[in-house]
Image (spheres, rainbow, N blue to C red):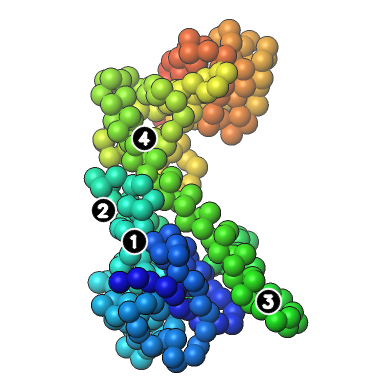
Amino acid sequence: MTIAHLVTHSGGFHADELLSSVILTRLFPQARILRTRDAAWTTPAPDRVIYDVGRDHDPERLIFDHHQKSPPLRDDGQLYSSFGLIWRHFGQDYLRAFGVPDLDLDMIHAAFDANFVLPIDLVDNGALSPTGPLADLSLPLLLESLKPVFDDRSPGADDRAFDHALTIARAFVEAAVTRKAAKLRAEAVVVEAIAAAGESRVLELPMGMPFRSAIERAGADHLLFVVHPRETDWTLTGIRREPEGFALRADLPEAWGGLTDAAFEAASGVPGARFCHNARFIAVAADRDAALQLAAIAVQHAGALRGTA
């Protein structure tokens, strides 16, 4: 079977068919996107994938719409958009084409579905509405903001905008997949470092990387701080208590907040202390020894506070 056409609806576009197009154009790079509502094109045929149009969902015939009277549902009863349907059917093939190892396919497929695809599905179906001051900066609304303005009636304006938005949407999908794959690689490094740290309150990593989820999965509740090198210095950072929010298991000492260079060295008593953020979640040191000395003081300070609580 050779797929020559990727068929979706014409006119204004939404995030779901745009992001579906990201998946399909990687798998079928020679196929042409055709944006139409012509029944001759939105009827299944061996040479096409149809999505977000056609009022039918039949993966065997490669049609993936969700606008019919009885739309397809997830196992938990939540509605799919075309993006969710395309991801369910083609997602693992996309990840494999993207270079994700077979060992990680199931985990990354599920994580991307939960954290990226599902919110798009919910917004598209009106089951979730971005709110608050960041609402207009949510991905669905940002992508839709690339549509032509209401009085741009120039021929082909919608299709040109779609092509432009597709490039941007592709960057977001690829970045999200890349980061999820990298997170899995990081977790293996962090788990090894946790074992090496033993009962220490300080986790030393060979470089900056995502660490919180691995710490939580390992049940390493005793850890308070992480140190690691950067290009020219070292950092000391706190560990968040929860995935959301900024509360830490332990803050850096209050006396360090906002200090730099000589003032920070004087307050901490550590040569090579370079900077501590006002919010006391990160400090910078000139080298490993200085970072570890700062970490030891921070651990002692945290213990003293707990002792007086």
**Residue 274, position in %: x, y?**
62, 17
Callout 2 environment at 10 Å: few (<14), some (14 to 19), or many (20+)? Answer: few
Q: Indicate the secondary structure of the residue bearing disc 3.
A: helix
Q: Is residue 47 above or below residue 223?
A: below
First reached walking from the N terminus: tag 4 or tag 2: 2
First reached walking from the N terminus: tag 1 or tag 2: 1
Residue underneath mark 3: 157
First reached walking from the N terminus: tag 4 or tag 1: 1
Give yes or no for contact between labels 4 and 1 (Cβ–Cβ under 8 Å): no
Q: Indicate the secondary structure of the residue bearing disc 1.
A: helix
Callout 3 environment at 10 Å: few (<14), some (14 to 19), or many (20+)? Answer: some
278 with respect to 298 (left or right) = right
Report the amino acid beneath label 4.
Ala
Residue underneath mark 1: 91
Which numbered tag is attached to residue 117? none
Question: Could you give the CA–CA distance between mark 3 and mark 2, rounded to whole angstroms?
Answer: 39 Å
Question: Could you give the CA–CA distance between mark 3 and mark 1, rounded to whole angstroms?
Answer: 30 Å
Callout 4 environment at 10 Å: few (<14), some (14 to 19), or many (20+)? Answer: some
Q: Is residue 234 visible?
A: yes
Give yes or no for contact between labels 1 and 2 (Cβ–Cβ under 8 Å): no
The mark closer to the camera, 3 or 1, is 3
Q: Indicate the secondary structure of the residue bearing disc 2.
A: helix
The mark closer to the camera, 4 or 3, is 3
Residue at 25% of width from left, 24% of height from top?
A: 195
Q: Is residue 307 visible?
A: no
Report the amino acid beneath label 2.
Asp
Residue underneath mark 4: 186
Residue at 32% of width from left, 88% of height from top?
A: 70
**Residue 290, position in %: x, y?**
51, 11
Q: Nearer the viewer, residue 100 or 208?
A: 100
Question: Quarter of the image containing the C terminus?
Answer: top left
Q: Nearer the viewer, residue 282 or 269?
A: 282
